[in-house]
Image (tube, rainbow, N blue to C red):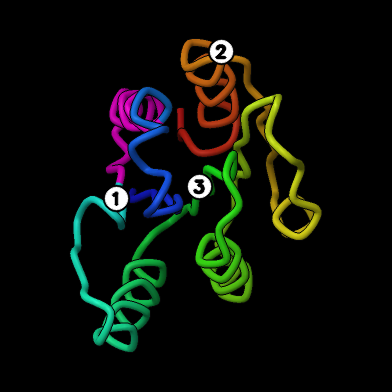
Amino acid sequence: MVAYISVSLHKRSLLKNQLSAISETLTMFGIEPLIFVDKYKFDLSQEKDMMAQAMTDIDNADILIAEASTKAIGVGVEVGYAKAKNKPVIYIRHHDADHSTTISGMSDFNIVYVNAEDLQKKLMEVVSENFVIA
């Protein structure tokens, strides 16, 4: 099982602890985390290649996790694509972050967290109850 993790490229460094918590949690359940912005580097002239790769990776993923504590058009595009492909979507945001009605409206699960530990606990609940076959 693979989880595509969508996050703002420009705000990625601010979410280091959260992305670590997400990756650790998924790995505990045998789910491979794929953080697109960490796996690939594209320059500005490669936007078509970038989006083609993102769509391929979402097609091959079982779940999409959107860390949307910071607004990013790309995250919304990836969520929309995943939803159109009938992939389950987990919307994650910090409790102080603006709520995204569009991402929330397309998500199957919403997690609002206080810190990385809280995020990990809540994600463990969602994953164990919905994506782990006992």
**Which label number is shown at residue 118?**
2
Element type at mark 3:
strand
Instruction: Write down the residue under mark 3.
Output: 65
In x, y percent, where is residue 16?
34, 29
Q: Amino acid at mark 1?
A: Leu
User: What's drawn in magenta, residue-wise?
Assistant: 19-33
Would you say the magenta stretch is mainly helix, strand or loop? helix
Left or right, residue 70 beside residue 33 = right
94 or 30: nearer the eye? 94
Compared to residue 119, the image places residue 54 above or below, namely below
Residue at the location (25% across, 84% down)?
46
Residue 89 versus residue 116: which sits nearer the camera? 116
SS class, disc 1: strand
Residue closest to the eye, 122 or 77:
77
Q: Residues within 10 Å of mark 3 (few under 14, many from 20)?
A: many
- Is 108 part of what is drawn in magenta? no
> Is residue 66 found left or right of 97 in the rendered image?
left
Give the residue number, with chain letter if any, for mark 1: 34
**Could you tell me residue 126's position as x and y percent?**
59, 29
Query: Farthest residue toward the top?
Result: 117
